[in-house]
Image (cartoon, helix red, strand yellow):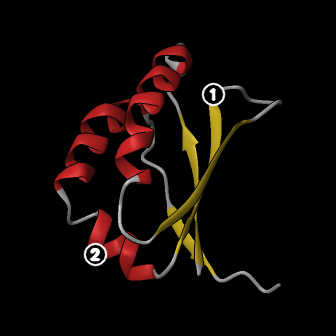
């Protein structure tokens, strides 16, 4: 299993719209092969920052399966215009 980690810098003033769009986008990712779980949290000190953690069965489930899918194109259309700058995405292997 791997954990996708992304800090999402939402443009200030778009938080409510981002959260509504994320609610629409969530079923797209959760239906993907290899998807395990998703957590999103809003930062307390800077409410325009969100932390996204997605668990995948394998790295390829995210980088090839999801990112190469039509569902990812819908995900992008719903969410990517809310970010400035575009977030870095990293992948981790849980240790325990």
| Residue at point 39%, 52% (across, down) | 29
Location of residue 53 in the rendering, given as x and y in whole percent from the top left corner: 62, 57
Q: Which mark is residue 17?
A: none
Decide which of 31, 19 is in the foreground and name it.
Answer: 31
Location of residue 42 in the rendering, given as x and y in whole percent from the top left corner: 70, 33
| Residue at point 47%, 25% (across, down) | 18
Whichever of labels 1 and 2 marks the residue nearer the N terminus, that label is: 1
Decide which of 55, 79 is in the foreground and name it.
Answer: 55
Numbered disc 1: secondary structure: loop
The span from disc 1 to disc 2 (Cα, nearest Å) is: 29 Å
Q: Badge 2, how many Cα within 10 Å: few under 14, some, many 20+?
A: few
Q: Badge 1, how many Cα within 10 Å: few under 14, some, many 20+?
A: some
56 up-or-down from 71: above or below: below
Which image quadrant: the C terminus? bottom right
| Residue annotated with mark 2 | 64
1 vs 2, front mark: 2
Which image quadrant: the N terminus? bottom right
Location of residue 33 in the rendering, given as x and y in whole percent from the top left corner: 36, 68
Give the residue at the far left of this rendering.
70
| Residue at point 39%, 70% (across, down) | 62
48 up-or-down from 30: above or below: above
Q: Mark 1 and 2 residues: CB-CB less than 8 Å, in contact?
A: no
Location of residue 73 in the rendering, given as x and y in whole percent from the top left corner: 20, 48
Task: Using residue 95 as the reference point, say whether residue 19 is left or right of it.
Answer: left
| Residue annotated with mark 1 | 48
| Residue at point 51%, 78% (across, down) | 57
5 up-or-down from 50: above or below: below
């Amino acid at each position: 299993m791997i954990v996708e980690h992304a800090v999402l810098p939402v443009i200030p003033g778009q938080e409510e719209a981002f959260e509504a769009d994320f609610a629409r986008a969530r079923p797209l990712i959760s239906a993907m092969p290899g998807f395990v779980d998703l957590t999103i949290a809003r930062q307390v000190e800077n409410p325009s920052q969100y932390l996204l953690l997605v668990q995948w069965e394998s790295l390829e489930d995210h980088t090839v399966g999801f990112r190469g899918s039509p569902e990812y194109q819908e995900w992008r259309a719903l969410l990517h215009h809310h970010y400035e700058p575009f977030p870095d995405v990293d992948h981790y292997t849980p240790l325990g």
